[in-house]
Image (cartoon, rainbow, N blue to C red):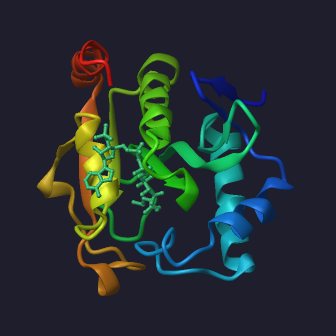
Amino acid sequence: MTFRHETERLVLRDWDEADSRTFWEIMNTPAVMQWLGGPQPFEEWQEGFARLQGYARDYGHCFWLVERKSDGELLGFCGLKRINYEGAPNPGMPEIGWRFRESAWGHGYAKEAAIASLDLAFDRFGYDEVTAVTVSGNAPSWGLMERLGMIERPELAYHDGKYSAQYGRARQWVITAAQWREHRARLLASGD
Ligand SMILES: CC(C)(COP(=O)(O)OP(=O)(O)OC[C@H]1O[C@@H](n2cnc3c(N)ncnc32)[C@H](O)[C@@H]1OP(=O)(O)O)[C@@H](O)C(=O)NCCC(=O)NCCS
């Protein structure tokens, strides 16, 4: 069954094969890829895309394609997979992740997609907790994690075989289902 979920401004959905090249053409910029090893050849992205399709097949969720409802513009991805990084101490733990095109930054789209993804993680997929991974330099990413009420678990930091030589240790922020319910109510009550 293909996945599709709507929020106020966004559609989160499974990927078609044809989305892969469009995504790479839009997203493969030095700014978007600053903390992800820099721009990558299409073949390398395509390997990651094949893994994404595997998560959708195996778990029923992945880092979904995110489009703007009003005009169908591809904005990025956001969603859920499971930890599978070389060196991570918690393989298999549900993970939220995001990547948006530069022109979409600062509009709250990532936050909107992330709120939906956490709702889905706890309500539809029945997970007890969700983690997110980034490096110290990526303030927009861990800033969003903290905005969502995620709390750093220093004991989950690790030396990532792919990225740590360049960016330092990978760090993780976690939220439980109970913490999310409480934080979500506060986010909504404060109007943002
Ligand atoms: C991480 C990313 C998705 C954030 O996108 P964004 O457009 O800034 O996110 P939003 O507009 O939805 O902002 C959500 C929250 O992030 C936080 N945030 C954004 N930029 C921040 C920064 N520089 N420092 C601290 N917090 C920041 C804010 O708390 C903001 O909430 P607020 O506006 O209500 O205060 C975007 O920078 C991106 O795609 N980066 C490139 C890919 C990437 O590195 N992905 C993550 C890999 S770990």
- The residue positioned 78% from the left and 61% from the top of the image is 22
The image shows residue 71, relative to residue 105, as above or below, that is above
Residue 6 on image: x %, y %? 64, 23
Residue nearest the viewer, comparing 178 with 141: 141
User: Which image quadrant is residue 19 in?
Assistant: bottom right
Drawn side of residue 90 relative to residue 27, left or right = left
Drawn side of residue 2 relative to residue 98, left or right = right
Q: Residue furthest left?
A: 154
The image quadrant where one finds the N terminus is: top right
- The residue positioned 46% from the left and 49% from the top of the image is 97
Residue 61 on image: x %, y %? 60, 37
- The residue positioned 41% from the left and 22% from the top of the image is 122
Q: Residue furthest right?
A: 18
Query: In this view of the protein, can residue 101 be seen by the observer?
Result: no
The image shows residue 38, relative to residue 50, as above or below, that is below
User: Which image quadrant is residue 46 in?
Assistant: bottom right
Residue 62 on image: x %, y %? 60, 43
Residue nearest the viewer, comparing 44 with 109: 109
Drawn side of residue 80 relative to residue 163, left or right = right
